[in-house]
Image: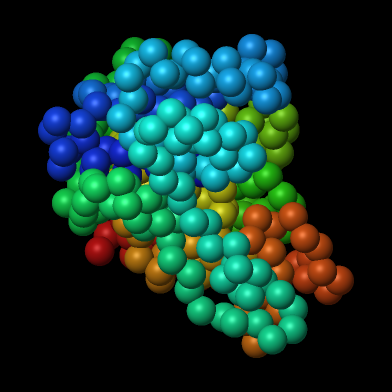
Amino acid sequence: MGDVAMTVPVIRSLIQQHTDVKVTVVSRPFFKPFFDDMDRVDFFGVDLENRHKGFFGIYRLYQHLKKLKIDFVADFHNVLRSKILRTFFKSNGTKTAFTDKGRKEKKELTRLEKKVLKPVKPMVERHVDTLESLGFKVDLSKIVFPERSVLADEILAVTAEKSINKWIGIAPFAQYQTKVYPTELMQKVILDLSANQNHKIFLFGGKNELNSLKNLQQNLENVILVANKLTFKQELQFIPHLDVMLSMDSGNAHIAAMYGIKVVTLWGNTHPFAGFVPFNQPLENSLIPDLEKYPFLPTSVYGNKIVTGYQDVMQSITPEEVVAKISTNLYE
């Protein structure tokens, strides 16, 4: 999800700065709402489980897309399926380009010995490079974020109207446990933030996380569960109304950032230097564990590698530090 969300500000900037360009985004149907508010952006949903599965399925996809008379192909994913697809286009004379994901630099960053702890180029900038190689210059600093839409009654039934409240979103989970802030510490963060009655806190997550979210809610009146109450599309309409989002290194951070919302991220066994800092966010909004105590960090790019003794690195990020960073973003 985060990978797709990171393409949104790039594509938004492209169509804003090149008014003669029309874009067709090819991705899983689930991600269509990311692009619904953009003029001159069409969406083609792929069926990777059936119709577009395997080599012949990708060729079938190519035959469909060829009918759109596409002039350029920008492969932001650069995996086997997209490589095959762009090869079909290239063989037909279409100009193609792909995003260099910096795998070598990321390997140097995450290896345990002879680690090179320096930032690699962010993914959004790599996508910009891809477009530039096709002849389209894009300046991300000139992006215009979409206007906030009026919240529908179905959303307000969950959130209520916003008055003088500061609205704080919290997405406390991630795909891998090495990127999840410990429950007891997150409970303390939520308790401290909720003590200010001018704060209203909204908890995001999946259906399978409802019980954990209810525990985090702690029966606090100004802490609201969004999970399982709003559809994904409704969440996308609601997120732009937040004042700040607290997230792990996860898709929710990138979703909030693509709407220009301030984002505070907590990092475990991963690290913001790997190129996944949410778009347009200052590095100081990325809170990391104690590197003196845990010198092998980051141990992986995605958090899928467990190193003995590094299971609890996030314990070194204190709730007070998290609350202070959120407060700075709320009131600066």
Q: Do we see residue 293 in this rendering?
A: no
Q: Left or right: 179 with respect to 141?
A: right
Write the residue at 52% across / 57% down. Answer: 101
Q: Is residue 75 above or below residue 310?
A: above
Q: Is residue 295 above or below residue 169?
A: below
Q: Position of residue 149 (x, y in %)?
A: 24, 25
Q: Quadrant of the N terminus?
A: top right
Q: Left or right: 177 with respect to 290?
A: right
Write the residue at 69% across / 13% down. Answer: 50
Q: Is residue 47 above or below residue 277?
A: above
Q: Position of residue 59 (x, y in %)?
A: 58, 20
Q: Left or right: 236 with respect to 299?
A: left
Q: Left or right: 140 with respect to 8?
A: left
Q: Do we see residue 32 in this rendering?
A: yes
Which image quadrant for residue 309?
A: bottom right
**Between 240 and 8, which is closer to the camera in this rendering?**
8
